[in-house]
Image: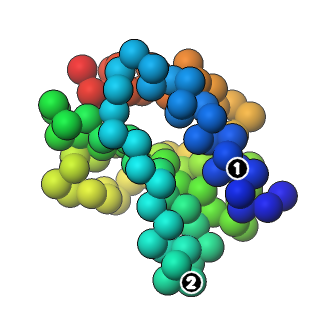
């Protein structure tokens, strides 16, 4: 599976999920540009200053790592994982609704 396919799947799910919450969504390809085969997608809530990091690794195309942090800390220490087949727009919506308040 190419690196673009999981990123496209994730982008589509985020697009469906954020319709009523309106976070700032950004695909950060800086790690990939630096030679690390990883894409990072961030979901930011400007009101609460909270962030959800979503990470895709080329070596594990069926798994997404995620964490709940603040915009100030950017990246925390603990990542959880979920398979892309388990992930849905409803899951992402629930995460945003619960975490962003």
Q: Looking at this view, is 26 or 52 the one in front? A: 26
Q: Position of residue 43 (x, y in %)?
A: 38, 41
Q: Is residue 45 left or right of residue 49?
A: right
Colour scheme of this structure image? rainbow
Residue 33, label in figure: none
Q: Residues within 10 Å of mark 1 (few under 14, many from 20)?
A: many
Q: How many marks?
A: 2
Quadrant hosting residue 52: top left
Q: Looking at this view, is 65 or 24 the one in front? A: 24
Farthest residue to the right: give it. Answer: 1
Q: Secondary structure at mark 2?
A: loop
Q: Secondary structure at mark 1?
A: helix
In the figure, 24 relative to 54: above or below?
above
The answer to whether residue 71 is visible is yes
Residue 35, label in figure: 2
Q: Residues within 10 Å of mark 2 (few under 14, many from 20)?
A: few
Q: Is residue 58 left or right of residue 75?
A: right
Q: Position of residue 90 (x, y in %)?
A: 56, 19
Q: Are marks 2 and 1 in contact (CB under 8 Å)?
A: no
For the point 31% across and 59% down, the residue is: 75
For the point 79% across and 61% down, the residue is: 2
Q: Is residue 101 left or right of residue 31?
A: left
Q: Position of residue 58 (x, y in %)?
A: 69, 65
In the figure, 88 relative to 51: above or below?
above
For the point 72% across and 61% down, the residue is: 3
Residue 6, label in figure: 1
The answer to whether residue 91 is visible is no
Q: Earlier in the sequence, mark 2 or mark 1?
A: 1
**How far apart, in angstroms, are the residues tagged by discs 2 and 1?**
18 Å
For the point 20% across and 57% down, the residue is: 73
Q: Looking at this view, is 43 or 80 the one in front? A: 43
In the figure, 33 relative to 20: above or below?
below
């Amino acid at each position: 599976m190419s690196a673009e396919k999981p990123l496209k799947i994730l982008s589509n799910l985020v697009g469906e999920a954020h319709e009523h919450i309106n976070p700032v969504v950004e695909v950060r390809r800086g790690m990939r540009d630096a030679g690390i085969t990883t894409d990072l997608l961030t979901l930011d809530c400007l009101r609460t200053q909270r962030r959800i990091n979503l990470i895709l690794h080329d070596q594990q195309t069926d798994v997404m790592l995620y964490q709940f942090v603040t915009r100030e800390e950017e990246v925390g220490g603990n990542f959880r994982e979920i398979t892309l087949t388990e992930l849905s727009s409803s899951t992402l919506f629930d995460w945003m609704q619960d975490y962003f308040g």
